[in-house]
Image (cartoon, rainbow, N blue to C red):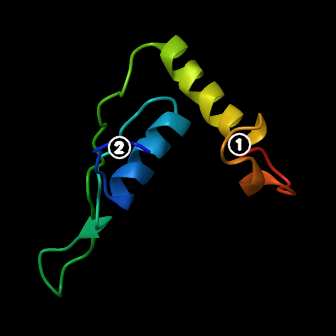
Amino acid sequence: GQGYWIATVLQLARGTAAIANGGWLHPLKIAAARRDGYNTGWKPLVRTQGPRITDSAEHLRAVHEGMVATIQGGGTATMMARGAPYLM
């Protein structure tokens, strides 16, 4: 049980990606480019850098280790990784 913590699937995926990529929370984008009319070319949208979820490499490493231990170390998700050819 996670208590009364409510998050959407997209929020969970974004947070997990931030943990996996070294702590960067990337802004969500629906489009990669835009154009100002049918007779104009496509212009890529500027990608902005999102905030970091932590400045502590030690804290991020502790979360990584906990996530791996949940699946690889006999935690509650051990069966999920059984037979996987890669580290989850």
Circles 2 and 1: CB atoms closer than 8 Å:
no
Looking at the picture, tell me which residue is in the foreground, 23 or 12.
Answer: 12
* Residue at 77% from the left image edge and 34% from the top image edge: 73
Q: Please, what secondary structure does the residue beneath circle 1 have? A: helix
* Residue at 66% from the left image edge and 44% from the top image edge: 76
**Residue 71 located left or right of residue 49:** right
Q: The N terminus is located in which quarter?
A: top left
**Residue 79 located left or right of residue 70:** right
Q: Is residue 7 above or below residue 70?
A: below
* Residue at 29% from the left image edge and 59% from the top image edge: 29
Q: Amino acid at mark 1?
A: Ile
Q: Amino acid at mark 2?
A: His
Q: How many angstroms separate mark 2 from mark 1 (CA)?
A: 26 Å
Looking at the picture, how far across and down is residue 71, in whole percent?
A: 71, 42
Q: Please, what secondary structure does the residue beneath circle 2 have? A: loop
How many neighbours does mark 2 have within 10 angstroms: few (below 14), some (14-19), or many (20 or more)? some
Q: Is residue 45 above or below residue 36?
A: above
Closer mark to the observer between disc 2 and disc 1: 1
Marks 2 and 1, the one that precedes in the sequence:
2
Looking at the picture, how far across and down is residue 72, in whole percent?
A: 77, 39
Looking at the picture, tell me which residue is in the foreground, 11 or 36.
Answer: 11
Q: Which residue is identified by label 2?
A: 26
Quadrant of the image occupied by residue 32: bottom left
* Residue at 29% from the left image edge and 67% from the top image edge: 31
Residue that sits furthest to the bottom in the current view: 38
**Residue 3 located left or right of residue 76:** left
How many neighbours does mark 1 have within 10 angstroms: few (below 14), some (14-19), or many (20 or more)? some
Looking at the picture, tell me which residue is in the foreground, 2 or 29.
Answer: 2
Callout count: 2
Looking at the picture, how far across and down is residue 25, in whole percent?
A: 36, 38
Determine which of the numbered discs, if any, sits on residue 71 in the image: 1
